[in-house]
Image (cartoon, grey):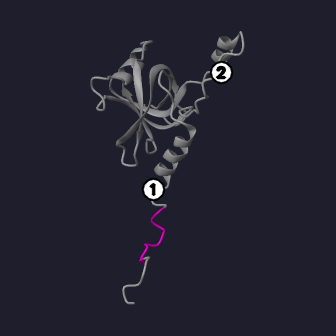
Amino acid sequence: MQQPKYALAAYDPEAAPHDEIWALCADAQHLFADQLPDRPDHYEDADALSDALTEPPVRLLGCAPRGALRDALESGRGDLGHGRVLRLGRLGRPLQHAVEGEVVAWVPSARGRGLVDLALDPWTLRPPRAAGMVWHTAHTARTCWASRPARTTVHGPSRNS
């Protein structure tokens, strides 16, 4: 498995931020979404229209299940529980919470033997798409600033005058 970018943790408000890690995941799809501004209802079928515009479930890809999630998958239990997606840093430590929701499905992953892809139906707002670009850059371009020369000049009036 490649360096994981995300972790799925058990959702337990009492234990946060130290929830049990259920899986380490290589990547995610549909994690980011820009929120549409609230608009007054102008149409009679506005509820039907808004239901049709829902976002797809968050997909966690190439996940190595562990603990209670692995036990649930092996037993074939239908209820996989409530989870919290965490963004991981390059050293594998959780950096921040991304989204919370119910784990609704899983399939074997094409990314490797023993790995699964999980679907999470979020009940919290997803991070904006711009956050996805920042997170990706921070995860992949860890030393992009190292190539910049150090600033050695001092601005302002010369002390020798």
Q: Residues within 10 Å of mark 1 (few under 14, many from 20)?
A: few
Picture coordinates of residue 9, whole percent (x, y): 37, 29
What mark, if any, has residue 142 been given in the picture? 1
Q: Quadrant of the C terminus?
A: bottom left
- Ranked by sequence position, the earlier of labels 1 and 2 is 2
Front position in the image: 72 or 159: 159
Quarter holding residue 69: top left
Magenta segment includes 151: yes
Name which residue lies at 59% across and 33% down.
34
* Amino acid type, residue under disc 1 in the picture: Arg
Left or right placement of residue 49 versus residue 137 in this view: right
Front position in the image: 91 or 43: 43
Tell me if residue 141 comes above or below residue 38 in the rendering. Answer: below
Residue hosting label 2: 53
- Tell me the magenta residue range: 145-154
Determine the residue located farthest toward the bottom in the rendered image.
161
Picture coordinates of residue 41, whole percent (x, y): 66, 16
Quarter holding residue 150: bottom left
Name which residue lies at 65% across and 21% down.
53
The mark tally for this picture is: 2
Q: Quadrant of the N terminus?
A: top left
Picture coordinates of residue 59, whole percent (x, y): 53, 29
Name which residue lies at 43% across and 45% down.
3
Picture coordinates of residue 4, whole percent (x, y): 43, 41
- Badge 2 marks a residue whose secondary structure is loop
Tell me if residue 7 comes above or below residue 135 in the rendering. Answer: above
